[in-house]
Amino acid sequence: MKIGLVSLFSILFVFSLISSVILPAAYGEVASLKVNNTFYKGGDKIYFSGTTATDDPKYYLVIFGPNGKFILLTSGTVDPTHTFQVMVDTGSQDNQPKFSLKGIYNATAFIAQQSTGKTVDFVFSPDGSPMIPSPPTSLISTSYSSTEIDLNWSTPTMNGGSSITGYKIERNDGNGFNVIQNTQAIAYPDTGLTPGKQYSYRVSAINSAGTSNSSNVAYATTMSAPTQNNPQSSPVTTTQTQTTNETQAIYEEIQKRIENAKRSQQLSNPKSNVVSLNENMGVGDLVGNASSSNTGITEHKASSFDFNNLMYPFIALAGAGLIMAVIYTKKNKLWFIPKITSTSKTDLSTSEFVEKDNDLIEEDYSLMILKNRLAKGEITIEEFNRLKDALKEP
């Protein structure tokens, strides 16, 4: 009995020494640690393997259960390549009672008297039934626009012994978390949001055993609403502006000339609505026009339109020369009118009438040419009046 107590105290002393001295240094020069699976059932063998960064030949592996209590401590030798491997049989007589709880276990590999080490988790189920998976990791939320936030995350490190069938996405818009979507993907675009507002998200994994705990919470704020710009008219180039100004100036000049022609027409013949000014008309044509109707005058003008346009420069010169010739002749009294030698009262009257009539026709014809040039804008009203007065002088 005393030996048993001594042995028990010795074991407790050694474990206490390991716990107080070695375990705090349990995270020593171990570079890596992994298991050959993430889910085990009762009777399975668990293989741990890892690497070290020191030449120490001894390593230790300690395992804790789902409730955080110590399960077992084992050790081994590191080979020359700085690798190690250890196996734990959960179905052995010694270990079976230790692995009785269903849940997540963790194991830590370390080297004595070192301050760091490596830890790995695994799921153990005595009856082999699946467990809920571990939560998704690394959830990130990114503002994509004023109405959309994009979510991305990583799969759980442990699926609980059953395949992940989906993910539950929750959103908090200020009124608590609410489920907004279930998806099988590891990304989701959340749309239809309010511009310039903050949202928070969390994601849970789902398998045949149930839904995991939620992931980390991620925050994002949507962008501000885009500004509505008033439609702008296309800029007008300098060339376009100049062309428009020139067109306007031409139009105004045409309108001005039309108004001047109307005023000249009213001044020259206020009682008539139709004026026929044709510089190639002869004296006989003048007499014919004087006795014809307005319609006939209009038709005569229309029929000679093309010819007048074509011969206008020559007619204008001829008309100007004719006017000057008439004025010069009247000034110098060189006008020749055949005298009728008759002493009768009737013959004298006829001779005077013919002379006066010829003067009237010549004066009217010259005046008509002046009116035509005035209507065309070739002379001003002042010039017209001056030449007209010159024609009237004896």
Image (cartoon, helix red, strand yellow):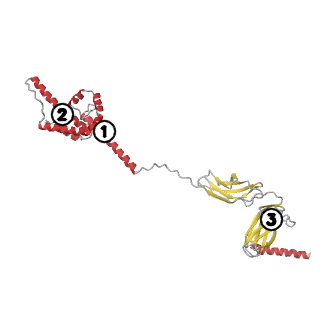
Mark 1 neighbour class, 10 Å CA radius: few under 14, some 14 to 19, many 20 or more:
some
**Would you call the spot at circle 2 few (<14 residues within 10 Å), some (14-19), or many (20 or more)?**
some
The amino acid sitting under disc 1 is Ile
Q: Secondary structure at mark 1?
A: helix
Circles 1, 2 touching at the beta carbon (< 8 Å): no
* Residue at the limit of the structure toward the right, as seen here: 1
Q: Is residue 3 visible to the viewer in this orientation of the structure?
A: yes
Residue situated in front as seen by the camera: 310 or 322: 310
Q: Reading the chain from its start, which is encountered first: label 1 or label 2?
A: 1
Of mark 3 and mark 2, the one earlier in the sequence is 3
Residue 52 in the image: x percent, y percent?
Answer: 73, 72
Query: Going from the N terminus, do you reach mark 3 or mark 1 first?
Result: 3
Percent across and percent down for residue 162 are 77, 56
The amino acid type found where label 3 is placed reads Ile
Residue carrying label 1: 258
* Residue, disc 2: 363
Report the mark closest to the observer, 1 or 2: 2
Task: Look at 87% across and 74% down and name the residue there.
Answer: 8
The answer to whether one can see residue 176 in this image is no
Question: Which quadrant: the C terminus?
Answer: top left
Please name the residue shown 15% across and 38% down the image: 328
Q: Quadrant of residue 249?
A: top left
Mark 2: amino acid: Glu
Question: For this rendering, which residue is in front, 330 or 84?
Answer: 84
- Residue 40 horizontal side relative to residue 191, left or right: right
Please report the residue visible at 81 percent of the width from the left and 71 percent of the height from the top: 74
Q: State the mark number for residue 46.
A: 3
Horizontal relation, residue 75 to residue 2: left or right:
left
Residue 317, percent across and down?
A: 22, 40
Residue 57 placement: quadrant:
bottom right
- Rounded to the nearest whole Å, what is the CA distance between mark 1 and mark 2? 27 Å
